[in-house]
């Protein structure tokens, strides 16, 4: 097995590939692209949150129109809908 110092000295003596000269441009272009994608993602998140808020307000407004008449619940009433006697009663 060759000595590590010999391997590193041979590697240092070799010429640098020409492709490495243009690597900076590719890296910076990739960084710019990822920044643009991050900005677009944050805009889309804002748009989605706004749309969800509008849908929630609209849904709440629609459900407020059709309100059901609620009977007051009392634990001491004889005809309470949630009483065990009414839940266990079998009505054919």
Image (cartoon, rainbow, N blue to C red):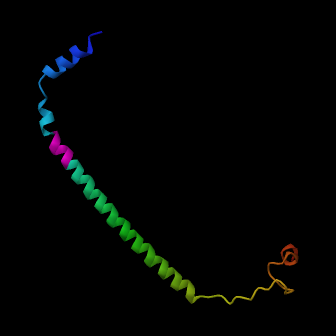
The residue that appears at 59% across and 88% down in the rendered structure is 66
> Residue 89: horizontal and vertical position, in percent?
88, 75
The residue that appears at 17% across and 17% down in the rendered structure is 10
Residue 68 is left or right of residue 15, and the answer is: right
Vertical relation: 91 (above or below) 6? below
Frontmost residue, 37 versus 67? 37
Frontmost residue, 1 versus 83? 1
Classified by dominant secondary structure, the portion drawn in magenta counts as: helix
Which image quarter is the C terminus in? Answer: bottom right
Frontmost residue, 1 versus 60? 1
Vertical relation: 88 (above or below) 27? below
Q: Residue furthest front?
A: 5
Vertical relation: 41 (above or below) 78? above
> Residue 73: horizontal and vertical position, in percent?
76, 85
Extent of the magenta region: 23-28
> Residue 56: horizontal and vertical position, in percent?
49, 77
Classify residue 84 by image quadrant. bottom right
Residue 86 is left or right of residue 50, and the answer is: right
> Residue 68: horizontal and vertical position, in percent?
65, 88
Residue 82 is left or right of residue 37, and the answer is: right
Which image quarter is the N terminus in? Answer: top left
Classify residue 80 by image quadrant. bottom right
- Magenta-drawn stretch contains 9: no
The residue that appears at 68% across and 90% down in the rendered structure is 69
The residue that appears at 79% across and 86% down in the rendered structure is 74
């Amino acid at each position: 097995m060759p000595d590590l110092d010999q391997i590193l000295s041979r590697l240092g003596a070799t010429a640098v590939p020409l492709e490495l000269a243009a690597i900076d441009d590719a890296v910076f272009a990739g960084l710019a692209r990822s920044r643009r994608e991050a900005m677009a993602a944050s805009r889309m998140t804002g748009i989605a949150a706004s749309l969800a808020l509008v849908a929630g307000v609209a849904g709440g407004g629609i459900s407020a129109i059709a309100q059901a008449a609620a009977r007051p619940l009392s634990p001491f009433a004889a005809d309470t809908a949630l009483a065990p006697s009414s839940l266990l009663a079998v009505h054919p």
